[in-house]
Image (cartoon, grey):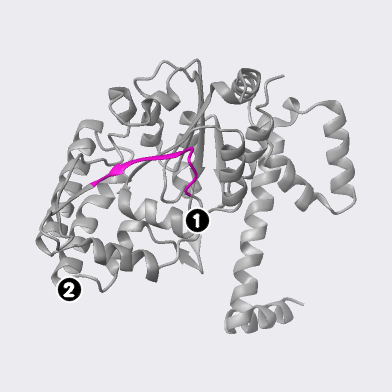
Amino acid sequence: MDILFLFIFFIIKNNDKGRIFWNRFLTWMSRCTRYFRFFENNWELLSKSVQDEMCIMIYRNSWFISLKKLILMPIRISPKAQEKIQKIIGGGKDNLLVLSDFDKTLTKWWVDGKVGKSLISFLRDGEYLDPKYNDEAKQLFEKYYPMEIDPTLDEKKKFQAMNDWWTEHFALLVRYWLTREVLDKVISENRVVFADGIQNFFDVLNKKKIPFVIISAGIEYLIHGFLEKYRLKYVNVFTVANTFDFSSDGTGKIVGVKNIIHGMNKSVLESKNFPFYSQIQGRKNAIILGDSPSDIGMANGWAYDVVLKIGFCHHPEEQEKLFKEIFDIVVFDDEGLGAVVELLKKTEKV
């Protein structure tokens, strides 16, 4: 039997379709383990009826699909999160504001068997500018990205590193003649793979007239362009990102950046110096979506009654503990925006 198993394993691993099946199987097993561990650790939070239903579902061998649906219900996560959720639901849609990162939060982390591209990487890895730009931009990435994801690096040092990174990178874009025409070409030639449930997420926010503010270290022009390309640019959607100054000589060349925004300075709303301030003024409850611990800074400087922090964890082996400490709800495995949509649907004032 062992020899037969090893033979089958060898065939699977050395065949393209077999490898796809094997990778999906490992992903499935990983999720099963995570779901079981969650309910084992939080069993006492479930009502008796839910516990009984769980046992029935497991007995019927339909537990995987059913558990997956249950895990997406945010009220199942923790007492702290449940209390905040009830306050947000009680406060209603007219008192709610949603703040979100863009890359790897509204977009998928894993695409076609590899890490998905950020918007800036379309430029950095593409053939849109002088090849020297690609080389120098990649050198900056290799220098500064390890600092960005290092949880042990002093916050002040990380802030300075991120500021230096983007100051130097935007200087490269000016030097190598990035133009509006090139940006439009990037938008037309590339595909953004959004998180599961993205259309429903935007539709619900728009229908309920809940302001949705994207705060990103990316390029505002690209964010707007891709939202319009995928018909997600609703009137309730606002963006705070790196905004280019374009030359007035007709070339469309960028000549600078108004204010540099990076992962460590997303508390930009506290200045209240933005055109849509009147449309979010007075909203006391907020939901924050992000894939980095620093994304919770989006709520700084605003007098909220409740801030529900939802983190999308893409490196559970290294980050799960930290994310559970920082965020009220943690989403794993590119599960998408289903839980957030379910919460938004409940915000009609009772």
Mark 1–mark 2 CB contact (< 8 Å)? no
Mark drawn on residue 108? 1
Q: Bounds of the magenta span?
A: 233-243
Front-most of 61 and 311? 311
Q: Amino acid at mark 2?
A: Pro
Q: Of marks 1 and 2, which one's residue comes earlier in the chain?
A: 1
Left or right of 50? Residue 91 is left
Residue for badge 2: 131
Res. 335 in view? no
Res. 327 in view? yes
Front-most of 166 and 21? 166
**In the rendering, at what x and y percent does residue 342 appear?**
67, 37
Residue ID at (50%, 60%): 193
Q: Does 310 appear above or below 29? A: above
Front-most of 202 and 341? 202
Q: Amino acid at mark 1?
A: Lys
Q: Quadrant of residue 91?
A: top right
Q: CA distance from mark 1 to mark 2?
A: 28 Å
**In the rendering, at what x and y percent does residue 65 appear?**
77, 52
- Which image quadrant: the C terminus? top right
